[in-house]
């Protein structure tokens, strides 16, 4: 990826490991949920992270927002290391969760939900908080009379608007969107995606957009990072990658995306086998048991992530 | 606060009636589900009557609770031969009016329920919240201590505690509160464990909430439903246990017109004068039954899973 010039947030070799077991009857083992993730987020740009369930996407979201601290690697905000529980981190990076039915406190009114971040991080007066709350509501397309209602009175799409508004009240520069539309109806998905696009162009936000839905990603991503079993396998400019995927896994993912064009030829690459357990990853390239192009080299050693025809790629047998 | 911008005052005024309307609708919804349960409404009615009777005891009661009439010992209720309308429910062995003593006794029962539940609720919810949120060694220690308390039969443990603290109504209430507390701890802990992993809690943490804020403002209000129901049911348990301790001579001491103590005093007259034992027993029965019915209705009305929309 291009250098760190102008980046709001730079991640270098972020890793997150979990210890599991270790009780009286089982040996303690390590799950490497996320390994060596490096990327930069630029104002007004969207980095999409895609991959199957269990590939470390959500772990990445939790590490970038410092809900969990990285086991190793660095996360820098404007050149300074980000700290967990620091006001600076919170005012720069905020998160929108996948499920809008779980991410809003059911006992709080919308006004209280929106103003909570301000109450906790600033010493604004109540009337000032209220002004910002109403302003943010208007920005995401909610009406002022919604201010005194409870979350259960809203539909899924409206709730996700509320969740986005809450993330915006601290005026962050980066939004981590953890599958923000996958819990919504298709028609509502488009509305929320349009809202996100408008907010990005108005406020110059950087998005870290996590998704498994490539048709959504194709629509909004500037850069893309494909993950498999905790590691990035292909990363680069979204258009380049979509036009000609170089990693066999990326190619398989893209061929699995349904297309609305009946004339398009279907050349679906069927993957065999299951995602291996991150407790016990296969030796060499993690994708080798499911890959049609794998040979002895792939089973013996892991390909490094290196620049290859306009992107970063971790594969011994690139398709382009 | 004098320099609030004009438009803000206006919008706040607009918001106030809207706010009240939302509250009223929530209350109406609660009453809709609660009133579907006839038993619960009956229980509520009896309970409210009891509260009114307890508050107005000096006005309603025909005599003082400890006033003795030496000319009217063990007078039967008015409908029986030898009874008189001067003593509607008869008199006890030292000539005190049963009705007046029962009316004053309602005060003690409600007081016991209130105090015991308050102590058990405050302690239990605090411990349960800490136990569920902090987890680890703290959780293990708190829960094992609660298991030990639960392992004893509740009345036996209360008896031992009163024996140590000394007999008396206050000590009996403390003992019963300690015995009832583990139920609150376990219930709160279970709810906290359930809620703590939800996204809105993580969301509050990302917004910068401290652990104390998360526990008291974010998680606790979402855990209160089952705890409120447990509180109503414990209310009747407390009355029952206090009556049992009173009967065994470890609770309220004579001449307090506490229902359990009245039962104990009347024990020797069971065969000769049925009314001295029957009425305090009935009073306990009706009160406990009414509160339990009310608690059941409350649980149904507060449980979102049982709501049809």
Image (spheres, grey):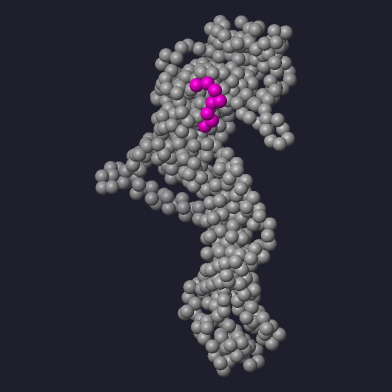
Q: Nearer the viewer, residue B281 or B158?
A: B158
Q: Is residue A211 visible?
A: no
> Per the image, is B134 magenta?
no
Q: Identify the residue at horizontal 58%, vertical 13% (top origin).
A: A234
**How many callouts does the rendering have?**
0
Q: Nearer the viewer, residue B60 or B278?
A: B278
Q: Does A161 appear above or below B20?
A: above
Which quadrant of the view contains residue A29? Answer: top right
Q: Position of residue A219 (x, y in %)?
A: 53, 19
Magenta-highlighted residues: A67-74
Q: Does B166 appear above or below A57?
A: below
> Per the image, is A68 magenta?
yes
Q: Nearer the viewer, residue A229 or A226?
A: A229
Q: Does B274 appear above or below A240?
A: below
Q: Is residue A65 visible?
A: yes
Q: Main secondary structure of the magenta part?
A: loop
């Amino acid at each position: 990826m291009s250098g760190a010039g102008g980046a709001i947030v730079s991640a270098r070799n972020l890793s997150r490991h979990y210890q599991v077991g270790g009780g009286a009857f089982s040996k303690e083992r390590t799950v490497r949920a996320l390994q060596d993730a490096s990327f930069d987020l630029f104002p007004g740009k969207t980095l999409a992270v895609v991959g199957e369930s269990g590939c470390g996407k959500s772990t990445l979201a939790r590490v970038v927002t410092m809900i969990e601290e990285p086991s190793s690697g660095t996360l820098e905000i404007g050149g300074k290391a980000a700290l967990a529980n620091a006001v600076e981190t919170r005012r720069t990076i905020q998160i929108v969760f996948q499920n809008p039915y779980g991410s809003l406190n059911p006992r709080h009114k919308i006004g209280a939900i929106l103003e909570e971040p301000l109450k906790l991080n600033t010493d604004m007066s109540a009337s000032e908080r209220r002004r910002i709350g109403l302003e943010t509501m208007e920005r995401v397309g909610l009406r002022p009379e919604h201010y005194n209602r409870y979350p259960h009175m809203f539909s899924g799409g409206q709730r996700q608007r509320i969740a986005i508004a809450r993330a915006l009240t601290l005026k962050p520069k980066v939004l981590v969107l953890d599958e923000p539309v996958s819990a919504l109806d298709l028609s509502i998905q488009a509305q929320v995606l349009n809202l996100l696009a408008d907010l990005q162009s108005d406020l110059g936000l950087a998005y870290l957009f996590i998704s498994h839905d490539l048709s959504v990603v194709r629509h909004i991503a500037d850069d893309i990072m494909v993950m498999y079993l905790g590691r990035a396998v292909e990363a680069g400019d979204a258009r380049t990658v979509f036009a000609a995927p170089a990693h066999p896994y990326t190619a398989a993912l893209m061929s699995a995306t349904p297309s609305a064009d009946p004339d398009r030829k279907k050349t679906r690459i069927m993957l065999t086998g299951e995602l291996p357990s991150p407790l016990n990853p296969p030796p060499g390239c993690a994708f080798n048991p499911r890959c049609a192009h794998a040979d002895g080299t792939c089973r013996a050693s892991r390909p490094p992530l290196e620049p290859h025809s306009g992107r970063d790629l971790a594969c011994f047998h690139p398709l382009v | 606060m004098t320099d609030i911008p004009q438009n803000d005052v206006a919008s706040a005024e607009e918001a106030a009636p809207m706010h009240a309307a939302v509250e009223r609708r929530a209350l109406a919804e609660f009453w809709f589900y609660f009133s579907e349960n006839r038993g619960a409404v009956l229980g509520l009615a009896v309970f409210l009557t009891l509260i009114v009777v307890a508050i107005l005891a000096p006005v309603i009661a025909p005599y003082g609770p400890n006033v003795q009439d030496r000319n009217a010992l063990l007078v039967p209720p008015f409908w029986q031969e030898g009874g008189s309308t001067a003593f509607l429910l008869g008199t006890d062995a030292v000539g005190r009016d049963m009705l007046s003593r029962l009316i004053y006794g309602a005060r003690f029962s409600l007081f016991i329920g209130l105090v015991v539940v308050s102590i058990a609720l405050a302690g239990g919810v605090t411990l349960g919240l800490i136990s569920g949120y902090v987890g680890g060694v703290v959780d293990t220690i708190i829960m094992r201590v609660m298991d030990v308390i639960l392992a004893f039969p509740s009345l036996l443990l209360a008896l031992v505690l009163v024996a140590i603290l000394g007999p008396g109504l206050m000590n009996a209430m403390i003992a019963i509160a300690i015995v009832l507390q583990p139920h609150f701890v376990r219930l709160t802990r279970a709810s906290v464990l359930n809620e703590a992993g939800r996204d809105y809690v993580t969301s509050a943490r990302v917004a910068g909430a401290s652990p104390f804020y998360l526990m008291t403002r974010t998680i606790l209000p979402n855990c209160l439903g089952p705890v409120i129901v447990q509180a109503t049911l414990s209310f009747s348990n407390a009355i029952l246990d206090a009556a049992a301790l009173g009967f065994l001579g470890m609770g309220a001491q004579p001449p307090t017109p506490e229902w359990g103590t009245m039962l104990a005093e009347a024990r020797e007259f069971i065969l000769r004068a049925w009314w001295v034992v029957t009425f305090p027993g009935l009073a306990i029965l009706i009160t406990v039954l009414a509160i339990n019915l009310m608690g059941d209705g409350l649980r149904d009305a507060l449980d979102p899973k049982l709501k049809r929309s």
